[in-house]
Every structure is written in C-alpha cells, then in structure tokens.
Image (tube, rainbow, N blue to C red):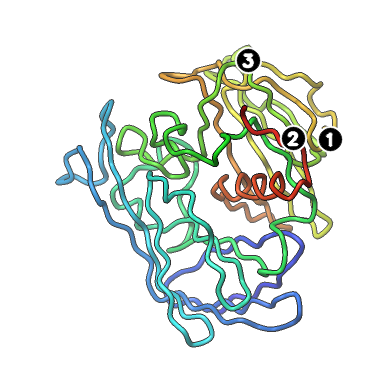
Amino acid sequence: MELRRKARPTLTPVEMDRGDVLRFELLDGTIRTVELLEADARILFTTLDAGVLPLKEVRGGRTFYEFSCRIRVDGAEHVLRREVPTQRTFDEPWVIAGMTIFFDGAADIFTFLREAHGECRPKKHARFAIQDATARICPPPLHAWCPLPKRGMDIFRAFLGEDCWMGPYFGASAHGGLDINHPAGTPIRAPLDFDDQYFFNTVAGGANNNRHRGHHRWPDGSEWQLQCHHMTRLTVAEHSPVAAGEQYADGAGVLSGYHDHSHFVFRVVESDGDAIMLDPWILFRQMYLDIAAGLVPDRRET
C-alpha cells in the first residue's frame, strides 16, 4: 500500500505493514520514500517459561527483548533497533534523509507479550513517528511534566525498572505508558496549554485509580492527549483551561504498588479520528532539550 503524509508543525505518527511505501513530503517540498521491508521482535532474556507464548505474568518475573525493522529510504537500506527495558529504551531517534524517525513499536512484540497493562499494540506491523529533521516535535517549547531526573531519564526509575513504554510488566504484559518513580504529592504540570482536562477515572467514583487526561488541539485539526495516572488530587477545576507550565495536580500516591510513581501516556488523535499511541519518551526528550536551550524553567530534580 502507498501512504502519503506531509510534514507539519507537529510530528506525524504513521503505522505501516511490510511492503507499504510511505511518500513523506518535507517542509521544503522534497519527497522522501520510505518502504518497510521487515519488522520483528525477539526475546533476549527471560526468567519465565518461554515454551508457552505469550508469556504469563509472574510476580518478580523479568524479560528483556528487542524490536527491529529494516526500511529502504530513497533506495538505501537501514536497520532500526531498540531494546526494552534497558537504558537503550531512551536512545535518540534516527535522522535519515532529512527526517527524524522515532521507531515506536512492532506488532511481533505481541507474539510473546500480552496487551494487559494499557493500550500499546500497533495496528500494523510497525509504528513510527516522523518529523522533518529541521523542525521540533511541536512549535511551543514543552515544560517539564514533572520534576525530571537530573541526569536524564533513568530506566531504574520506571517502577521496578521495567515499566517504560511497552516494558514487560512482571515479565509478560506490555506496559502502555512510561512510569517515573517520585514521592506522593509531586507537582504535575501541563507540558503545553490544555484546552480541556479532567479525571476520566477516580477512586471516589468507584475506579481503582485516579486517571487524568489533558487535551491540546492543533490548528490542523489533530489533537494530543496527555494522560497522567496515580494522581493524588487535582489542583485546578476540571474542564478549565490550563496554561503551559501550570501545576494542575499532585502526582503519585494512589494505587502505587512497590513505589510511589506517576504513569504517563501520549496519544495522537488525527483530524480523521484515527488515534495512535506513542512512547511518552518522545515528549520527555523534547522537555530535556527545551530546558537545555533555556526555553522553559529548569525543573529537574535537585
């Protein structure tokens, strides 16, 4: 299948099957051709019984895996590979032929993991987020969503060191978000303006957790939805606008498990209604870059 996308002020999520060809137009009008040749995943190590797939959760179970793809960009082949859940989970994206390419997932992960800890399975063989390499992931600078680990994102701060994006929870269930361990009551701030925001689950309403969703609508009709779970309380009224950098909640402290932590989720809803989940690390990476550039307050941990 041939897919066509144009670079825009915000990054473009795209899912592809093997054999699909993407025609991606850069901001200067140049067309790049990206063909997905292969996409797969494999277990590197597990403490669980790998003879029965998908794996079954075991308290304390550990699994490490990699997912990879082979793409042809304007005739040149490239192999993209990521490891989960290691520090390489937070590697830099690829820059190829004027495109920044975040390789976000492969469907083959779910030959050995279950989707039982939040939505994260690609709808096709591979999922990417692509942007013109001369542009940011979005026009406004991103404020720190929470106080950021001082030296950069740390896999050991992802709950038990496994709850990064699609990390194997108890060795077997892909994690549909990114956890960051921090104390109950940690300030949670809007990375960018929220047009609307609210709890969609509350303990008071009978749910097992407090889960919040903030919406930011872009001029092209697409929308970013940013969720934070395990929140202690809101510090603003629901359905009120929230300015970038404004504290809107106290994080962590609810349904925390072994460590108090907040759980972050990133969803892009296109103008046609198609919703694509993406790795929240994409957002946090931009937050670190914007702090380093002096574009937003330095809200890293002391």
Pointer 3 residue: 205
Q: Earlier in the sequence, mark 2 or mark 1?
A: 2
Pointer 1 residue: 243
The CA distance from mark 3 to mark 1 is 27 Å
Q: Residue at x 26, y 45 (%)?
A: 54
What amino acid type is highlighted by mark number 1? Ala
Question: Of the residues tagged 3 and 2, which is closer to the observer?
Answer: 2
What amino acid type is highlighted by mark number 3? Gly
Q: Residue at x 56, y 46 (%)?
A: 281
Q: Say which quadrant the C terminus sits in.
A: top right
Q: Which numbered marker is on residue 34?
A: none
Toward the viewer: 148 or 48?
Answer: 148
Q: Residue at x 61, y 29 (%)?
A: 301
Give the total number of marks visible in the rendering.
3
Q: Earlier in the sequence, mark 3 or mark 1?
A: 3
The CA distance from mark 2 to mark 1 is 7 Å
Whether residues under marks 2 and 1 lie with C-beta atoms below 8 angstroms apart, the answer is: yes
Q: Earlier in the sequence, mark 3 or mark 2?
A: 2
Label 3: few (<14), some (14–19) or many (≥20) C-alpha neighbours in 10 Å: few
Pointer 2 residue: 190
Label 2: few (<14), some (14–19) or many (≥20) C-alpha neighbours in 10 Å: many
Q: Is residue 60 above or below residue 271?
A: above
Name the spot of residue 127 as percent of width and height, x first. 50, 60
Q: Is residue 226 above or below residue 141?
A: above
Name the spot of residue 289 as percent of width and height, x first. 67, 50
State which quadrant residue 205 falls in.
Answer: top right
Instruction: Determine the secondary structure under disc 3.
Output: loop
What amino acid type is highlighted by mark number 2? Ala
